[in-house]
Amino acid sequence: MFLRSHRLLKARLNQQIYNMAGKKKSSKGKERPPEFDKLLKPAIAVALAMMAFQFFKGINSEVIRINVEDEMELREVFFGEGEDKNYAVLCHPETAKYPVSSVFLDASSDSSAPAEFRLLDCDHVLSNEKTVFERFKLDKKKRPTIFVSGRVGPPKQVPPKFLKTGTMLGKALKNLLIPKAEKIETTQDLRSKCLDKDVCALLLKGGKVSPNYVKDAISKLLVEFPKVAFGAIDTSVLYVKGIEAEFLPELSTGQPRFVVFQKVGDDDGSKKDSGRLKTSLATLPGHGVGYGQISNLIADVVQKKQEMQKVSALPTIKTRTKKLVEEEKAKRTRRADQKKRKDGGGSSTTGGAFETNDGSKEGRKAERDRRRAEHNKNNPNYKEKTPEEIAEIERKRRQRMEEDAAKWNMVPDDMPEEGEPVSDEDSYFDEGGDDYEYDMIDGEEEEEEEEEDVLDLD
């Protein structure tokens, strides 16, 4: 009995040891993945939730479609007439079988872009018998075709590189619609971004970075005058030829200057483009650039109360060099001299003497007066001649010139008078003159023939 119970106890212990060993061995091996059937139901649930989210998102962000039959609404969207808003428009036909661009919907639901989102059938034919694509030169092949319009101007297509995500489109719309001062670095930039506009305000910075009060003033002016183009140029590196030396004060490091351009039409008042750009300008006196001064100047130019100065030649952008700076200083000195002489105050140089003759009538006269005064000073006993003495000196001078001309007259004494024909007797050639000339020529030819008959025996 005792042996039997001992055997049973021993068997149980061995069974427990075997079970423990099996568990340790199984824990060291790789875990088996769950069966596919167990993952199928959660995956379906996630997909349905995402579809429901997109569906409700599309309902909440429904974009209004523009009525192509309403001409007033079209003009409001294209040119900003009426409510004066900016629009971001997606070209999407009413009969389109494909859905609205998700990039456009994401940007519209973001609500960060300062624009009203609309849908438009750009294949609609307008009153000028052109479609929207043809009228505003939109590239139909670049899809989705999105453009901005309204207060910023006629439709302008958004580049395709910004149409990858809704976030990128939103940033692009901000850059296109939020007003800012354009950076000008070349003559082409100055013409396209400033001079081609009806009114353009140009800030000539005295350094790479403008003071904070200037930045704040420009930000306020951009909102106050939305139809005025603004530009900025760093004149510490660049030079505006045709403007700085003629109309603006001299550059002072760190001090900004300001000028307003206004486009000028033809003299006959016609709006037809003559092919030549003409402009006029108004400037602020001195280097003082403040919000109040700039605002008043721009308002006077827009309302045509400001007296504008005509620009004879369009300004150009050059790299600021020592040569250009020296030319500018010479122009400023010359202009100051001319102004002082015009006012009757004489020359601006020391002692009132005109030291440099600029070639003008006044400059030459001033030079003669200076030399006359110097001569009189060096010759105190000199006495001014009377008009009769001056006339006598002139008569003697003319007589002396005629005598000198007669000495140099080489005409023979036996020449006939002027107007009479020359006879054969007056000829300087004898009758046989021609024959003699020909005989000489023939003789020379004979000598050449004799020289040719000699053989070179060497």
Image: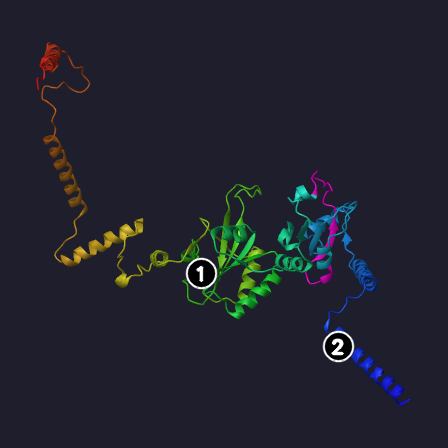
How far apart are the alpha carbons under marks 2 and 1?
81 Å
Quadrant (top left, top right, bottom left, bottom right) of the N terminus: bottom right
Q: For numbered disc 2, what is the local secondary structure?
A: helix
Q: How is the image coloured?
A: rainbow
Q: Which residue is mark 2?
A: 24
Highlighted magenta segment, given as a residue range: 108-131
- In the rendered image, the residue lying farthest to the bottom is 2
Residue 441 vertical placement versus 17 (above, below): above
Q: Which residue occupies 33% across, 60% down?
A: 345
Q: Element under label 1?
A: loop
Side of 238 relative to 157 (left or right) = left
Q: Position of residue 416 (x, y in %)?
A: 14, 18
Does the magenta portion include 225? no
Residue at image position (23%, 51%) is 368
Give the tally of numbered discs.
2
Task: Identify the image quadrant of residue 272.
Answer: top right
User: What type of secondary structure mainly makes up the magenta span?
Assistant: loop
User: Where does residue 389 sit, x and y in percent of width and height?
Assistant: 15, 45
Residue 357 horizontal/vertical position (percent): 28, 52
Q: Earlier in the sequence, mark 2 or mark 1?
A: 2
Q: Which mark is residue 90?
A: none
Image-based side of 132 in relation to 310, left or right: right
Question: Mark 2 belongs to which amino acid?
Answer: Lys
Residue at x 8%, y 14% (from the top left corner): 454
| Magenta span includes 116 | yes
Residue farthest toward the right in the current orientation of the protein? 1
In the displayed structure, 418 sits above or below 57; it is above
Mark 2 or mark 1: which is in front? Answer: 2
- Is 423 left or right of 215, judged from the image as shown? left
Q: Which label is found at residue 235?
A: 1
